[in-house]
Image: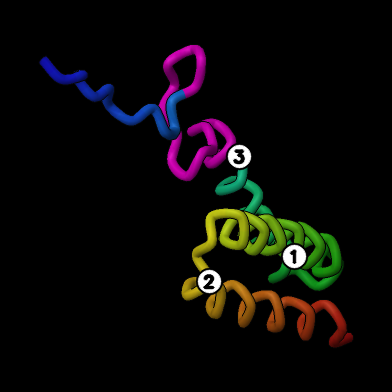
Amino acid sequence: MGRVSQPSRAGVYPCGIRGVGGYSDRFRQMVGVLEWIAAAAVLLQPLRPIGCAIAIAVMLGVLVTLFWQRQFMRLEYPLVLLALLWLVALAR
């Protein structure tokens, strides 16, 4: 008889937690909260530099993840958002 193939364990952590893209659910939720905080801070003039810094850090993380996963065709949208964030951060 042949060997029985095992199901893929991609995205499964030693404790059995499954994640999307290799990241845990809690980490993805934390990034989502940071995105909301950055969006609110960008709308308020005194907090705009902090909001831009948070959003730029998140976008850089997105770019690193897409490079790491070799999903080069999906880089355009985050690159445009990063450029817009730089423009907002530099405009005073």
**Residue under the point 69% across and 83% down:** 84
CA separation in Å, label 3 and label 1: 15 Å
Picture disc at residue 30 = 3
72 on left or right of 51 = left
Separation (CA) of disc 1 from disc 2: 19 Å
N-term-proximal mark, 3 vs 1: 3
Tell which of 39 and 13 is nearer to you.
13
Where residue 75 sits, quadrant-wise, is bottom right
**Above or below for 71 versus 69:** below
In the image, which disc is placed on residue 43? none
Q: Which residue is mark 1?
A: 56
- Label 1 CA crowd tier, 10 Å (few <14, some 14–19, many 20+): many
Q: Tag 2: Cα neighbours inside 10 Å, few (<14), some, or many (≥20)?
A: few
Where residue 33 sits in the image (x, y, percent)?
59, 46
Q: Secondary structure at mark 2?
A: helix
Disc 3 residue type (three-letter): Met
How far is mark 3 from mark 2, CA to CA?
25 Å
Q: Is residue 55 above or below residue 32?
A: below
Are discs 1 and 2 less than 8 Å apart at CB?
no
Which of disc 2 and disc 3 is earlier in sequence? 3
The question of residue 18 being in magenta is answered with yes
Q: Which residues are magenta?
A: 13-29
Q: Picture coordinates of residue 79 (x, y %)?
A: 63, 77
